[in-house]
Image (cartoon, helix red, strand yellow):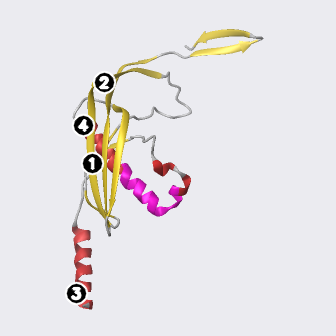
Amino acid sequence: MKIKSLQIALLVGVVASTTSCVSTNKGFQSSPVISRSVQLDPIKADIKVDEKTKLIGESTSTYLLMFRISGDNTFADGINFSTDASAGLLQQLNPLKLAQAGRLAKVRGAAAYKALANGDYDFLVHPNYTTTVKNYLFIKEYAVKVEGYGGKYQNFRTEKQKIVYLENGKEIILQDK
């Protein structure tokens, strides 16, 4: 019995060390250059939302203990989840909750990627995430469905800032040159 257990453990070790995975990430919504020596005029853009078409993306991942055994390999980076339940300080201190939050973020990112992949959109407007977690003995399955509208940035432009100084109760407005 001991030899059989050792053989199984060795087989699992060999399989785990010889398998590989590929993932693709696509980033959305970047920040401008942040440097103290660079002064930039604010960049403004118009936002066009396609209210006629609802975008839907779904993703599922399955984990055996701490190893992902199935799931998507394409993710949208930079997606913010305003209703992220893992943001609480107590949950961040708990390693199990932190691991679950990381797994959910990946599955949400994969669902967002799928929702945005079929159109020429820059971001999701008013995304609603439905998350289901199924627990089995050593297996956890995370399923996420996202629904929202596609948004696109258009008409990029820079505008000079107006600087307002109050001097003896008077307003002086100067154009930045």
Instruction: Report if the CB atoms under discs 2 and 1 are less than 8 Å apart.
Output: no
Give percent across and percent down for residue 43.
Answer: 45, 22
Whichever of callouts 1 and 3 sits on the residue coming sooner in the sequence is 3
Q: Nearer the viewer, mark 1 or mark 3?
A: 1
Give the left or right position of residue 80, taking residue 88 as reference: left
Give percent across and percent down for residue 19.
Answer: 22, 65
Tell me the tag on residue 4: 3
Whichever of callouts 4 and 1 sits on the residue coming sooner in the sequence is 1
Tell me the tag on residue 17: none
Q: Identify the element where label 3 is drawn.
A: helix
Q: Residues within 10 Å of mark 3 (few under 14, many from 20)?
A: few
Report the front residue among 2 and 162: 2
Q: Identify the element where label 1 is drawn.
A: strand
Report the front residue among 69 and 10: 69
Query: How would you classify the magenta stretch by its main secondary structure?
Result: helix
Tell me the tag on residue 51: 2
Give percent across and percent down for residue 149.
Answer: 32, 30
Quadrant of residue 52 within the rendered picture: top left
Q: How many numbered dots are placed on residues in this image?
A: 4
User: According to the image, label 4 marks what residue?
Assistant: 117
Quadrant location of the C terminus?
top right
Q: Residue at 28% x, 59% y: name it.
A: 62
Q: Amino acid at mark 4?
A: Ala
Q: Identify the element where label 2 is drawn.
A: strand
Tell me the tag on residue 59: 1
Whichever of callouts 2 and 1 sits on the residue coming sooner in the sequence is 2
Q: Amino acid at mark 1?
A: Ser
- Looking at the rendering, the stretch of residues picked out in magenta corresponds to 91-105
